[in-house]
Image: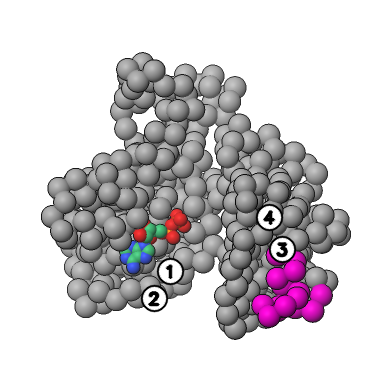
Amino acid sequence: MKILVINAGSSSLKYQLIDMQDEKVLAKGVCERIGIDGHFTHKTDDGKWEFDVAMPDHTAAFEQVKLALTKGEGKVIDNLSEVSAIGHRVVQGGSKYDRSVLLTDEVIADIKAFASLAPLHNPAHVQGFTAATAAFGPDIPQVAVFDTAFHQTMPEKAFMFGVPYEYYEKYDVRRYGFHGTSHRYVTDRCLKLLGKVEGTRIITCHLGNGSSIAAVKDGKVIDTTMGMTPLDGFLMGTRCGAIDPSVVTFLMEKENLTPAQMDAVMNKKSGMQGISGVSSDDRDIAAAVKEGNPRAKLAWDMRSYQIIKYVAGYVAALGGLDAIVFTAGIGENSSALRAEILEGLAFLGVKVDAEANAQRGEEKEITTPDSAVRGFVIPTNEELVIARDTRDLVEG
Ligand code: ADP
């Protein structure tokens, strides 16, 4: 069975075609600048093809994907009918969806309704569904896999915000958490490495451009750093993370900013970028720190400090800690940040294995055998989770 995994954004569409027999990625790529000018990239084992091509909308983008999969040098299938199902990443599933589901009219209506909570993402996903149906026909099964689903086990005391209760009732204002598919993947791997589920207390750190941490007890999330939107938590590439909420109203008044402008400041101009003035990319920040740039160092130190505080708080929430997992671009690659976080947990009896931690990008235990808590790097694979869920739902 071959499954096409789709991640549709407002101006981009990422895809992977996975053969479920051996879970091999046959092809992957991305349509960028949809509705602007259009840039297409397609990769297989045999090579990479990249070109500019007009893609006025998501349907046009799907046409390019179809062509790339079935024709020319990058072709990996003879016919579209070889694709058995399509799995879509969906950012916001509200309080209703605690697992992946087959796309029906009702599910699509719900995803549209949750757009008020994810205005940049959910409408784009709906465009992705429509374009997929146009490209593959109405009979192909399609599945929605929600970023929020894995966090739905959080208790009320963790997901409620201390604003009047009526806003929860009226507008569903609460913590949802994101990156759930990634936290779920690395949790499953970690539980396998621990050899048990019941009685386990783990913390999963997804550290990428966007970053979040989850506290997982007995395999279920009990708390996570991202909130109603992916802005909450700690310093990210361009997002501020948690700040005193009064800073928002104060700056809006002082700088005469609209809500949309303030939103852009917090989402796009803050975080590592905003503090360092160097870049949002961690490699640039690390290089600037090495060169002695004081603001890059400040950004780096702020993030480590905030992460250690969250992790230590979650240890209390979990009543102890068996394992901590690092994943995503920074978590998998930055041995310096991992070492700093683990050293910050030395009071728990955490002992870093410096040699193991120096390696990058592969699944690895990075603490010593006598460490009181086991530390792991586990490369994430959200597309594989989406493909597996899609297969499971299609096979019933
Ligand atoms: P997202 O999926 O949220 O866009 P990723 O998980 O791909 O982000 O992570 C991107 C981040 O990972 C960037 O800040 C990048 O600098 C960082 N990163 C990638 N490779 C390395 C590396 N070798 N060392 C340190 N950081 C890295």
Relative depth, front residue between 112 and 347: 112
In the image, is 1 to the left or to the right of 30?
A: right
CA distance for labels 2 and 4:
38 Å
Residue underneath mark 3: 64
Q: Earlier in the sequence, mark 1 or mark 3?
A: 3
CA distance for labels 4 and 3:
10 Å
Residue underneath mark 2: 362
Q: Which quadrant of the render holds ligand 1?
A: bottom left
Q: Is the residue under label 4 in contact with that under label 1 (CB below 8 Å)?
A: no
Name the kind of residue labelled 2 in the image: Glu
Residue at (59%, 36%) from the top-left corner? 119
Residue underneath mark 4: 54
Q: Which quarter shows the C terminus? A: bottom right
Relative depth, front residue between 161 and 23: 23
* Residue 375: percent from left, percent from top: 30, 67
> Within 10 angstroms of label 4, few (less than 14), some, or many (20 or more) residues?
some
